[in-house]
Image (cartoon, rainbow, N blue to C red):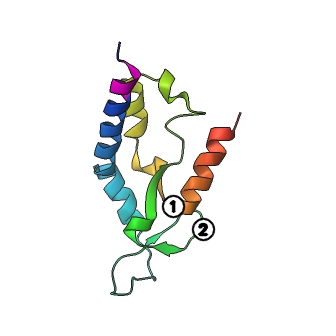
Amino acid sequence: MLDNKTKSSIINFIRLSFRQSKQCQDALKESIHPTVFGPRGGKRYKCASCGNGFNSSEVQIDHIMPVCFNKKQKDMTISEYVDRLYCNVHNLQVLCKDCHKIKTNRERHEN
């Protein structure tokens, strides 16, 4: 059995790895804003919630069906966590940081 500190370190590494995964890259590609460009003509990403265009540093990948419900991550095994994190790209969306924070807070306080 892993202690909490070790489990947290492993989870953090897995999350970092997920951010570099094909699923994340595909979700970003699907959300490139068709009409809004950055000041130098670069890509902007459309937030699935508010619809505005943002730079890559201003967006985050969100799981439509949350990985953890009501902070139950501590009750999940690492294997269960990985299975839920590395989901199909259809369960992922790009949200601006503000919309992501609102959605996450709402999910944490549901039932």
Give me the disc on residue 97. Answer: 1
Q: Which comes sooner in the sequence, label 2 or label 1?
A: 2
| Residue 31: percent from left, percent from top | 43, 66
| Residue 34: percent from left, percent from top | 44, 78
| Residue 50: percent from left, percent from top | 60, 68
Q: Quadrant of the C terminus?
A: top right
Q: How many numbered marks are there?
A: 2
Q: Secondary structure at mark 2?
A: loop
Residue in the image at 44% along x and 66% along y: 58
Image quarter of residue 49: bottom right
* Gap in angstroms between the C-alphas marked 2 and 1: 11 Å
Q: Secondary structure at mark 1?
A: helix
Q: Which residues are drawn in magenta?
A: 3-7
State the residue in front, 97 or 23.
Answer: 97
* Extreme residue in the front direction: 5
**Left or right of 62 on screen, residue 102:** right
**Magenta-highlighted stretch: main secondary structure?**
helix
Residue in the image at 66% along x and 46% along y: 106
* Extreme residue in the bottom direction: 40
Question: Is 35 drawn above or below residue 76 in the view shown?
Answer: below
* Extreme residue in the top direction: 1
Give me the disc on residue 50. Answer: 2
Residue in the image at 36% along x and 33% along y: 11
**Left or right of 3 on screen, residue 52:** right
Question: Is 99 drawn above or below residue 84 in the view shown?
Answer: below
Question: Depth-wise, is mark 2 or mark 1 nearer the camera?
Answer: 1
Callout 1 amino acid? Lys
Residue in the image at 31% along x and 31% along y: 10
Callout 2 amino acid? Cys
Q: Residues within 10 Å of mark 2 (few under 14, many from 20)?
A: few
Q: Residues within 10 Å of mark 1 (few under 14, many from 20)?
A: some
